[in-house]
Amino acid sequence: TNDRFEEKPYEAGSSHEACDVVAIGLGGDLYYGSAREFRLRLQSIIALQKPRFLILRVRRAYAMDFSCWSALFDIAEVFHAQGGKLYLCGVRPDVDEVIDQARMRDVIPNDHIFTQDKAIFQAFHACLAATGNQLGEGPSLSNRWREYFRPIETEARPRFVPLDESPDP
């Protein structure tokens, strides 16, 4: 199990504090009937939480049609123009082709895509390590994210690493 993370659904009345890192899990079939809601939720999350890094876990998203890809790419372009970085983790290898065909490589570059692995959270932790290395000084993080990202003192190692990968004391 991964007891370091608490899933908090985005629903009416829920509260989510502003944070530089926001991770969202997507699941099920994402098709035209859910594209509008998908777009509105992502826009709302970005407006309320003001992340610099938006991580979409898509391992449990089984199918995504054109309308949802279009919504995702539209949001990714706006988020990118505002200085945000969108990451996809747990993606199938064929997603690269979709991104290339949509000419979205500038917005979602290769190093922002983490493909599925046999270990459920491996792509997610690799994505978080990449994100943590870009946080800089004094990031705006929730207490849960502060617990997850731990400073490393030596210059030879990344500035932040997931706790799961830190050496035993």
Image (cartoon, rainbow, N blue to C red):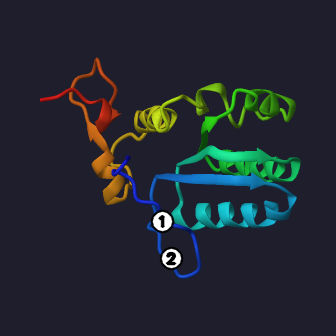
The disc label shown at residue 8, or none: 1
- Please tell me how crowded label 2 is: few (under 14), some (14-19), or many (20+) other residues with Cα within 10 Å: few
Q: Mark 2 highlights which residue?
A: 14
Could you tell me how far apart the alpha carbons at marks 2 and 1 are, in whole angstroms?
Answer: 8 Å
Whole-percent x and y of residue 121?
47, 38
Residue 162 picture quarter: top left
What amino acid is found at the position of numbered circle 2 in the picture? Ser
Image point (37%, 55%), residue name: 141
Indicate the secondary structure of the residue bearing disc 2.
loop
What amino acid is found at the position of numbered circle 1 in the picture? Lys
Image point (52%, 54%), residue name: 51
Residue at the extreme top of the image, as rendered: 156
Q: Tag count in the figure? A: 2
- Please tell me how crowded label 1 is: few (under 14), some (14-19), or many (20+) other residues with Cα within 10 Å: few
Image point (87%, 58%), residue name: 32
Whole-percent x and y of residue 47?
60, 65
Q: Which residue is at the front of the view, 95 or 128? A: 95
Residue at the extreme left of the image, as rendered: 169
Q: Which residue is at the front of the view, 26 or 135? A: 26
Indicate left or right for 137 with 12 as reference. left
Whole-percent x and y of residue 132?
41, 38
Indicate the secondary structure of the residue bearing disc 1.
loop
Whole-percent x and y of residue 16?
47, 69
Indicate left or right for 2 with 94 as reference. left
Q: Quadrant of the C terminus?
A: top left
**Marks 2,1: beta carbons within 8 A:** yes
Vertical placement of 101 versus 34: above or below?
Answer: above
